[in-house]
Amino acid sequence: MNQSDKSKIRTSKGLILVIFILIAVALAFKMYNPQTENEVDFFSEDAKKQISVELRNDQTQVSQTAKITGAEAAEQEEKIYLLRVNHNEDVTMVFSIQVVSQEDGMDEALKMKVYDETHDEVLYEGSVRNADNKVFETKQVTNAAKKNDTRYRIYFYFEGQASQQYETSETEVKFDWSIPEDQTGALKMSKTGDVKVILYAFIAMIVITGVLLIVFRKRINPEVFNLGRPAEEEKEELLEETDEKQQPESGDDIEEDKE
């Protein structure tokens, strides 16, 4: 085996080691709440439904819209939002609700419950119509991580037989999170961007790597998977040691033997 092949094998081993490390990081990486330290398993059903939003120095306001049909609300529709606020100083986070549109008076019959899971507080429970233009304020206290997460569970449902009347109707509700203009200077740039982007990237990379390994498995030198040094290299070193032992003794040693 020439030096070039040895170098390629070492490089390939290094890449495989990096892949294994990234896989370990991806499995260990979980979304968490820095206030309560309650971890959320990314692979849980809740996390799959969760929508992540973020406030930072270049994004002081963010909105999400939920369209609810009567058929969905009949079985109780749940929306989960995770808000991350990146800040260097204490700020006031403003959460507001606006009814964008509704059909057939559905907003009066449709009930909504807004639960702040992070602070274990029900912010609102009642008809969607009465929730229009509701505003809630929460103080975000700065911490060592310089970020705070707030998790909301918002439920839409009907009481009694109202669901049958509005089965084909639709109501649209807008949720808005912002920081008062005079406090926006306390916001900072996010280090991670969207709270799930990194994990999605890890998973995509793992899948792509796995596919490539399967497709090109026949072309990969088996020595790459040898955790020690390449077998050919070990054989060459062993042969060199054997040759050295078999070399004739020096002239001085021969003369000493004759004496």
Image (cartoon, rainbow, N blue to C red):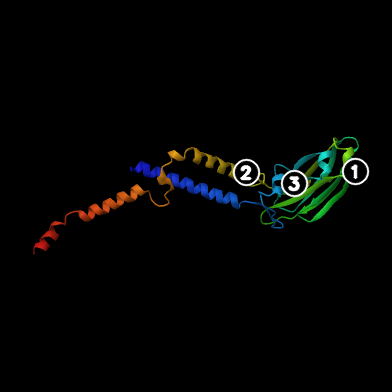
Residue 99 located left or right of residue 42: right
For label 2, the residue is 200
x then y, percent, for residue 187: 71, 48
Residue 208 located left or right of residue 85: left
Is residue 209 shown above or below 119?
A: above
Is residue 72 something that shows in the picture?
yes
Q: If the image is split into quadrants, where does the C terminus sit?
A: bottom left
Question: Callout 2: helix, strand or loop?
Answer: helix
Please tell me how crowded label 3 is: few (under 14), some (14-19), or many (20+) other residues with Cα within 10 Å. Answer: some
Is residue 53 something that shows in the picture?
no
Asked whether 139 or 34 is in front, the reply is: 34
Of label 3 and label 2, which has the lower sequence position?
3
Q: CA distance from mark 3 to mark 2?
A: 18 Å
For label 1, the residue is 161
* Residue at the image position 78 percent from the left and 39 percent from the top: 65
Asked whether 133 or 47 is in front, the reply is: 47
x then y, percent, for residue 33: 70, 54
x then y, percent, for residue 23: 55, 48
Is label 3 or label 1 in front? 1
For label 3, the residue is 81
Q: Indicate the amino acid at tag 3.
A: Tyr
Of label 3 and label 1, which has the lower sequence position?
3
x then y, percent, for residue 210: 53, 42
Please tell me how crowded label 1 is: few (under 14), some (14-19), or many (20+) other residues with Cα within 10 Å. Answer: few
Is label 2 or label 1 in front? 1
